[in-house]
Image (cartoon, rainbow, N blue to C red):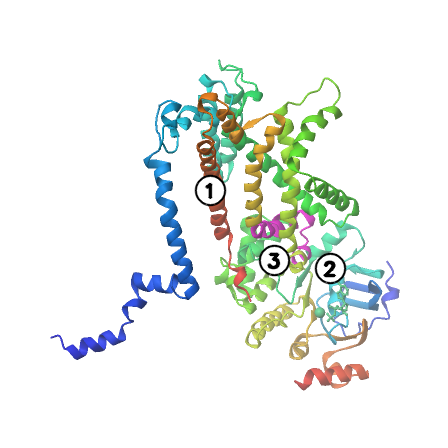
Amino acid sequence: MTDPTLTAAADEQRPPFWRTGAAGWVRTNLFNTWYNAVLTVLILWGAVAVIPPMMDWLILNAVWGDVGPDACREAGAGACWSFIHEKYRLILFGLYPFDEQWRPLVGLVVFIALLGVTMRRQLWGRPLALAWAVGAPAILILMYGGVFGLTYVPNTNWGGLPLTLGLSVVGLVVAFPLGILLALGRRSEMPIVRSLSVVYIELIRGVPLITILFMASVLFPLFLPSGVTIDKLLRAQVGMILFAAAYLAEVVRGGLQAIPKGQYEAADSLGLGYWRKMRLIILPQALRISIPPLVNTFIGFFKDTTLVIIIGLFDLLNSAKTALTDRAWAGFYIEAYLFCAIIYFIFCYSMSRYSQNLEAKLETGHKRRR
Amino acid sequence: MSLSSLDKSPTEEAAPGKAIVQMVGVEKWFGDFHVLKDIDLVVDQGEKIVICGPSGSGKSTMIRCINALEEYQRGRIIVDGVPLTQNLKNIETVRSEVGMVFQQFNLFPHLTVLENLTLAPIWVRKVPKREAEETAMYFLQRVKIPEQAKKYPGQLSGGQQQRVAIARSLCMRPKVMLFDEPTSALDPEMIKEVLEVMIELAQDGMTMLVVTHEMGFARTVANRVIFMDEGRIVEQNAPEAFFNNPKSDRTKLFLSQILAH
Ligand SMILES: Nc1ncnc2c1ncn2[C@@H]1O[C@H](COP(=O)(O)OP(=O)(O)O)[C@@H](O)[C@H]1O
Ligand SMILES: [Mg+2]
């Protein structure tokens, strides 16, 4: 049955083994040119040099569980995860009263759940609006208390992750429409509207967020009639909104500029009018192509919330710093920052993945044209 | 209102009917550039007008003035009794009654074909969605692509896109249709399918102003052919007379160039 000449012929027709399978992949992707080969070897060497000691420190030699700081200070001890074990509630919830921390936890879970549901566009509709209408006040009641037998917790005691998430999500939700209006204003044919938008955007972009937060906190109250006070958290929130709106405006303007004139003319020629034209034709396209820079801005903004420390609010990162001020646990800052980094990463990466998903969904094939 | 000032426009060849577009002494500048010079044009209901002329002669600018995509600085334009002035309300009224088909189709790429067709009826005419969709399907049938309703414009050929664009305008039940070189961006084999749709539309009595160099189309449907050069209407006549018996030298030159290839 096996005719040697036949199998040889069949072999001839098959690609040689080093061009297929794993060997083929390695050859075409890692060693296809001499410099690629050098790079591959260098990276492999680097990985071998770095990864095992890192694993030792992170996991094998790490100190886990409910043990005191002394265990972490022994020679050869790795990461001190017992520091996180001891302090995670302070880091996550800041100065919120210890016994009441289930409240921000529940609030956080509800908030994230609502956000998660909102991300699915097919679920948009009246029930979702209702869920927010019930959920948002419920979260505030949980956080503030003072009713239903919950003790009152002033928002000066709020902190940690709920603060970071709340400030950034509320900030972006309000700043986004403002930014769109500013972008439209900057391209308006009305000179006054245009100049006002330009001045606003350039002024706000021209100064650091810290300055704006500082001004919101110190200068803002000076303009208010005496006796009227706005609390610190609200001032910070307003400052962040004003700041984010300017940046988002420029991102949206970039998208608007990419929309061909013909789209405006087609909408005009159907008699749509300015606002309908923008809402139904121009903005959906402009925002879609702006998704990558928008998400970039969102992520930057999310991380910038930590600057609220300037007016004495303790977000996630600043709560972690507070945890480090405990003398007994002094010095474990790598663990503290790693812990925060992981939390930040989870949120930022989710945002990034979601946006990629959204982009793919909104793709309607018009890029293929010509 | 006295129309005596319009009498100098030669409308004798046109079918008798009410004037639907009136341009009187229209002048337009782009900065210092005088792009439209003393344009007088009266279009009667049901009339089909083909506008030709060398590139840059102001053909697009002229028809774009009729739905206020361009402003003009002197003269008057009245569309179906509504004067086109700075008044935004008038402009939107006129736009909703005048359909426009562009060289580059300008479909909305983020909407399906059906949504492209129903958008303006729903939002401008306040037609219920159901009814708008029925109308849309009717016109998609008229332009012979009902099976493409759920697709996005980016998935269609140029000829199909232009037919969708025509249907989109028709869904607004316009009184006048403007076409600005509707077949110039198309491959030769697609030009025919678009022209066929336009000819059927003309036979149905639609008032049409068509900028095109498709002289076969002009011969088939036009009541009048207008020749423009350097911002002026140089000559206008019924197609037979226009092609067989051009009066001005510039028209002759243009026709010889156009018909040469
Ligand atoms: N927005 C504009 N700004 C300045 N000049 C323009 C503009 N649009 C058209 N033009 C000029 O006006 C002239 C007529 O243009 P157009 O009406 O498009 O000509 P046609 O359609 O006959 O080729 C051309 O010289 C063109 O360069
Ligand atoms: Mg043109």
Question: Is residue A18 shown left or right of residue A156?
Answer: left
Indicate the amino acid at tag 2. Asn
Q: Secondary structure at mark 1?
A: helix
Q: Are marks 3 and 2 on the same chain?
A: yes
Mark 2, mark 1: which one is toward the viewer?
1
Above or below, A305 against A283 in this view is above
Q: Main secondary structure of the magenta part?
A: helix
- Image quarter for ligand 1: bottom right
Instruction: Give the residue at x 79% y 67%.
Output: B42
Residue A350 shows which numbered tag? Answer: 1
Pointer 3 chain: B
- Say if residue A329 shows up in the picture: yes
Viewer-closest of B57 and B92: B57
Q: Quadrant of the C terminus of chain B?
A: bottom right
Above or below, B30 against A118 in this view is below
Above or below, A245 against A106 in this view is below
Q: Position of residue A238 (x, y in %)?
A: 65, 31
Q: Secondary structure at mark 3?
A: loop
Indicate the amino acid at tag 3. Cys
Instruction: Give the residue at x 48% y 51%.
Output: A361
Q: Which residue is mark 2?
A: B67
Which residue ends up furthest to the left in the rendered image?
Answer: A1
Q: Which residue is mark 3?
A: B171
Q: Are marks 1 and 3 on the same chain?
A: no
Residue A297 shows which numbered tag? Answer: none
Q: Which residues are magenta?
A: A266-290
Q: Residues within 10 Å of mark 1 (few under 14, many from 20)?
A: few
**Alpha carbon separation for disc pair 3 and 2:** 17 Å
Q: Residues within 10 Å of mark 2 (few under 14, many from 20)?
A: many
**Alpha carbon separation for disc pair 1 and 3:** 43 Å
